[in-house]
């Protein structure tokens, strides 16, 4: 038993880095959620997300119009030492691309946002872009996103995010990272979609974890 526990912790360190120990506090793959409805554990801020199904897989889907930012809250309120992850799927239409994100600390908190129209992935705090990098999004492919906030000193919090294609190994390194001296506000996790292409954005396998220091 001790050997198995040691191996499990070591595996967690490889995936998550220094904030390895975790406890899942929210998780859903929508497989037991009724189709064409919003599960009761979600709270819409903007727009009416509903559960859909394709090829036997269920997911939650944003509206396809009008062009706006649609936001959905889920999980318990948290502030730091927390990680959120999800799979996201979108399509392009001509030169129009969706924008999508996952976030922590409520609708005005931190989020990891992919903006294919600008070929960019960025860490945002509210409406402010804190740091960004070039990112080549593949339309019609599921993409994993992970965002975490960890307290690293008494008055310092590290926020970092990464993305990788579904079916590939999660990278050990983080694509984006910042440090902030302002304490994160308590708030629920977030998914955000802006269907600029006129097609809906899908989210699946949402997970919220407590992570250790």
Image (cartoon, grey):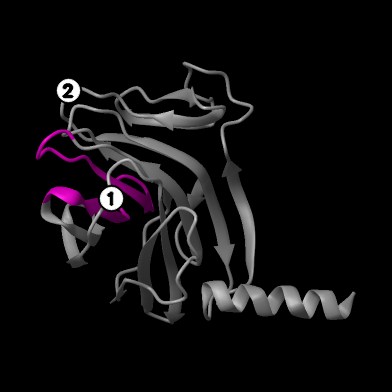
175 falls in the magenta region: no
| Residue 83 x/y as whole percent | 49, 60
Residue 183: image quadrant is: bottom left
Q: Which residue is mark 1?
A: 138
Query: Dot 1 lies on which element?
Result: loop
33 or 89, which is in the foreground? 89
Q: Quadrant of residue 171?
A: bottom left
Q: Which residues are magenta?
A: 93-117
Q: CA distance from mark 2 to mark 1?
A: 23 Å
- What x and y, as percent, mark residue 124? 23, 59
**Nearer to me, 97 or 138:** 138
Q: Which element is circle 2 on?
A: loop
Q: Is 86 placed left or right of 103 in the picture?
A: right
Give x and y (percent) for residue 147: 40, 61
Q: Position of residue 25 (x, y in %)?
A: 61, 51
Question: Where is the N terminus found, in terms of image quarters?
Answer: bottom right
Residue, disc 2: 66
Residue 197, relative to residue 84: is it above or below? above
**159 up-or-down from 68: above or below:** below
Residue ranking furthest to the bottom:
153
């Amino acid at each position: 038993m001790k050997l198995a526990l040691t191996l499990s912790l070591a595996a967690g360190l490889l995936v998550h880095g220094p904030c390895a120990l975790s406890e899942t506090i929210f998780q859903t793959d929508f497989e037991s959620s009724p189709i064409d409805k919003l599960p009761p554990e979600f709270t819409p801020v903007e727009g009416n997300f509903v559960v859909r199904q394709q090829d036997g897989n269920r997911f939650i889907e944003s509206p396809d119009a009008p062009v706006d930012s649609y936001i959905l809250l889920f999980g318990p309120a948290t502030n730091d030492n927390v990680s959120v992850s999800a799979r996201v799927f979108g399509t392009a239409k001509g030169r129009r691309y969706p924008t999508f994100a996952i976030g922590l600390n409520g609708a005005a908190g931190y989020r990891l946002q992919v903006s294919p129209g600008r070929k960019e992935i960025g860490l945002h705090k509210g409406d402010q872009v804190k740091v960004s990098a070039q990112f080549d999004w593949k339309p019609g492919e599921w993409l994993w996103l992970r965002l975490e906030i960890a307290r690293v000193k008494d008055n310092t919090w590290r926020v970092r995010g990464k993305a990788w294609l579904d079916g590939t190994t999660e990278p050990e390194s983080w694509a984006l990272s910042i440090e902030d001296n302002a304490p994160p506000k308590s708030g629920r996790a977030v998914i955000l979609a802006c269907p600029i292409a006129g097609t809906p954005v899908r989210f699946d396998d949402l997970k919220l974890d407590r992570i250790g220091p």
